[in-house]
Amino acid sequence: MPRNPNAEPKPFVLVHIPQEPPDRRSVATHERFRGLTGRLELTFTVVSEYLFVGYGAYEFDPNHGNRRPDVWYTFYRRNDQLCVPSTSLKGAIRAIVEAISNSCVLQRHRREQVASNHHQPCRFRDEKSPLCPACRLFGTTGYRGRVHFTDFLPQGEVQPTVVKIGELWEPKRHDPSRRRFYARKTFQSVGNPAPQQGFRFVEAVRREAKFRGALLFENVSEAELGLLLHALGWELEAGSVQIAFSPKLGGAKPRCFGSVEFRPVRLRLWSGNVNALLNPQVVQGKEVLSLLSRYLQACRDDGLLHGASWTALKEGFQPKNERCPREVY
């Protein structure tokens, strides 16, 4: 029996860890250029009610008088400018790559056990060590990854606001056979702005806020780049690149914050010869979409995309006309 039978439905998206083992292969080394090396410039737009990316800092109002926020967690800033740091993007996109490519389960609580022996964390010893798709791209202990993000900075004027939400706690139950994500539901406003036990305040940006940055990749195959594009929420449909879902970034995901929609802006590609290093190929407009279509198809042809996991995550991330839980669950 559930602890609280009257609790609001939890906004979980659960993706089963496949029974088949990950497709572990030897790694690409870093001593020379091979494959695709480049920079994909991106924008993302907030499509949920709010986006919050914190870093433990907070501000307070000594004159709140119990009528307005007293202490609130602040949005991450770089040189006093709002910023979504590269680490936030890398962690969120890696989690999606792990799920849709049937990779190992790298992050888990020390008391948690992975149900499948096949999905124990990869171990890198030398360049012949076989790694799962996510570890080959993002790296693991002893092996530097080949995928990085820049910080994403606001485009135009983006004004944050202080929002009251229910407290956030570490999940008390874990299903070792599934990966957990959060659905795109509607945020429930608490209404009363006064401080209250069981609630906290966060500084967030609103829907339609836009940020710009880049995805950097080194020595990746077309299929690997296609896997990253799928993790950004894109898919190939009827021969063209379409939005499949909106990934989630930042904090307060249990309150249904953080859904964003990525768009490509420009692609720069370098190859191994000196002239190409000095003069990269620059692709933009419709030509970018044509190349991205090719990479998305290569990912499917190579078998890097795990079909059942992709379908489960895509369906789970679709917008739902349901309210997110307001209080602790």
Image: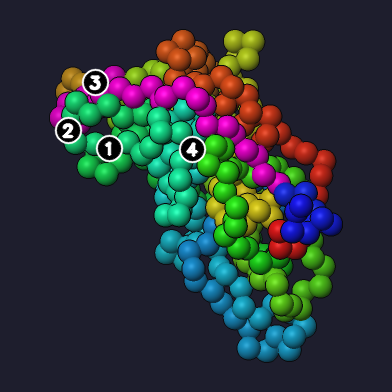
Give residue 160's quadrant in the image.
bottom right
Q: Nearer the viewer, mark 1 or mark 4?
A: 4
225 in relation to 259, above or below: above
Q: Amino acid at mark 3?
A: Arg
Residue at the spot 78% in from the left edge and 39% down from the top edge: 320
Q: Main secondary structure of the magenta part?
A: loop
Residue at the spot 42% in from the left edge and 50% down from the top edge: 87
Q: Quadrant of the C terminus?
A: bottom right
Image disc number at residue 34: 3
Mark pair 3, 1: CA separation: 24 Å
Residue 17 screen position, x and y as percent: 52, 32
Look at the numbered disc 4 and give the secondary structure of its residue.
Answer: loop
Give residue 28's quadrant in the image.
top left
- Label 2 crowding class (10 Å Cα cut-off): few <14, some 14-19, many 20+? few
Name the one closer to the observer, 301 or 55: 301
Circle 1 residue: 123
Horizontal arrangement in the rendering, residue 130 relative to residue 202 (left or right): left
Image disc number at residue 115: 4
Give residue 302's quadrant in the image.
top left
- Label 1 crowding class (10 Å Cα cut-off): few <14, some 14-19, many 20+? some
Mark pair 3, 4: CA separation: 37 Å
161 in relation to 119, above or below: below
Q: Amino acid at mark 4?
A: Ala
Q: Which residues are magenta?
A: 11-37
- Label 3 crowding class (10 Å Cα cut-off): few <14, some 14-19, many 20+? some
Dot 2 or dot 3, earlier in sequence: 3
Q: Amino acid at mark 2?
A: Asp
Mark pair 1, 4: CA separation: 18 Å
Circle 2 residue: 126
Horizontal arrangement in the rendering, residue 47 relative to residue 292 (left or right): right
Tell me if I can see residue 266 in this picture. Answer: no
